[in-house]
Image: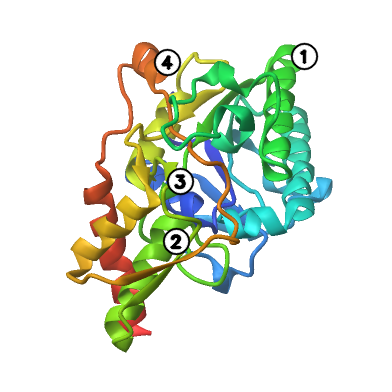
Amino acid sequence: MTDKTDLVVVTGGGGFIGGHLVARLLEEGHINVRSVDVKPMGEWYQHHDGVEDMQLDLTMRDSCMKALDGASTVYNLAADMGGMGFIENNRALCMLSVLTSTHVLVAAQEHGVERLFYSSSACVYAADKQIDANITALKESDAYPAEPEDGYGWEKLFSERMARHFREDFGMQTRVARYHNVYGPHGTYDGGREKAPAAMCRKVIEAKMTGDHSIEIWGDGEQTRSFMYIDDCLEGTRRILDSDIIEPINLGSDELVSINELVSIVEEIGGITLNRSYKTDAPQGVRGRNSDNTMIQELMGWAPSVSLRDGMERTYRWIHDQMVGA
């Protein structure tokens, strides 16, 4: 366990998960937290008193050396990413996150960082195992033979291997979790980088606000996913970093839902029924994806447990407040 006075660095701290993680560390009593992000500070999702905020471009080695100076523990969440629309149309940008992944590891090794967490993604999983909406949940070994999501998934899989070899070659205690579709308040809900849960909340709220009771759904709506609420993500991240689990492990809900079912949940929360249209030529990713939580339950005696209905209600209320107050 990290000493509460040691320096903890969160890269991507101005982002959705990073902002929540910084808050969690403060709640746990950490008094020496540094949050680093490339975005101008006015664009950070959250700011917290008592945290050292730094705006740095972590694709640059010198920036990483500055960001990690004095650090004992690092959570590397920094990446150029978004929802499926962004990932499918910005593969080169997603691949360039490898510069951040590389330079953070190099700086961590040179500064003698004790433990480093790397946030990977379910996008590393082989595409041929995700062609059916009624998917068999993905277990950790399904990442190989490698056929990940083009661009973003390849970068994540490669960076997983780097984290492994820095552990093997330099003795750095690296831990890797494969996040499955994290959502919750204080995240992106418009602009092109939003993911399905936030996008559906926004669309339902817009329909209520404008009186246009229609909603466009990407694909046929029968594609399936699991979605993990931010509180489960934070709990799992902290547990995994402090564990002895050295191989990449799933961190996601195993509650499988179709996009049509997701829309129905949001309609119920919003108290409205909409006329659905389907944009079948829009980016929609793999046909089905779900998390097999056997390993995390066996090794940690814990797994994500917040129901989609409960998490979506909290998310909807926050987005509603942002939109109504805008």
Tag 1 or tag 4, which sits nearer the N-term? Answer: 1
Secondary element at image label 1: helix
Image depth: mark 1 or mark 2 in front: 2
Q: Is residue 74 visible?
A: no
Please tell me which residue lies in front, 103 or 203: 203
Left or right relative to 203: residue 7: right
Q: CA distance from mark 1 to mark 2?
A: 37 Å
Between marks 2 and 3, how big is the CA–CA gap? 23 Å
Name the residue at 55% across, 72% down.
191
Is mark 1 in CB contact (under 8 Å) with mark 3?
A: no
Q: Is the C-beta separation of discs 4 and 1 under 8 Å?
A: no
- Identify which residue, 85 or 68, lies in the foreground: 85
Badge 2 is on which residue? Answer: 187
Which residue carries the number 3 mark?
223
Q: CA distance from mark 4 to mark 1?
A: 26 Å
* Amino acid under disc 2: Gly
The residue under the point 51% across, 62% down is 194
- Badge 1 amino acid: Asp
Distance between mark 1 and mark 3 Cα atoms: 41 Å
Q: Nearer the viewer, mark 4 or mark 2?
A: 4
Q: Position of residue 262 (x, y in %)?
A: 33, 53
Q: Which residue is mark 4?
A: 295
Mark 1 lies on residue: 169
How many angstroms separate mark 3 from mark 4 (CA)?
A: 25 Å
Q: Report crowding for label 3: few under 14, some 14 to 19, many 20 or more residues within 10 A (C-alpha).
A: many
Between discs 1 and 2, the one toward the N terminus? 1
- Which quadrant would the C terminus be assigned to in this image? bottom left
**Image x and y of residue 252, in percent:** 41, 34
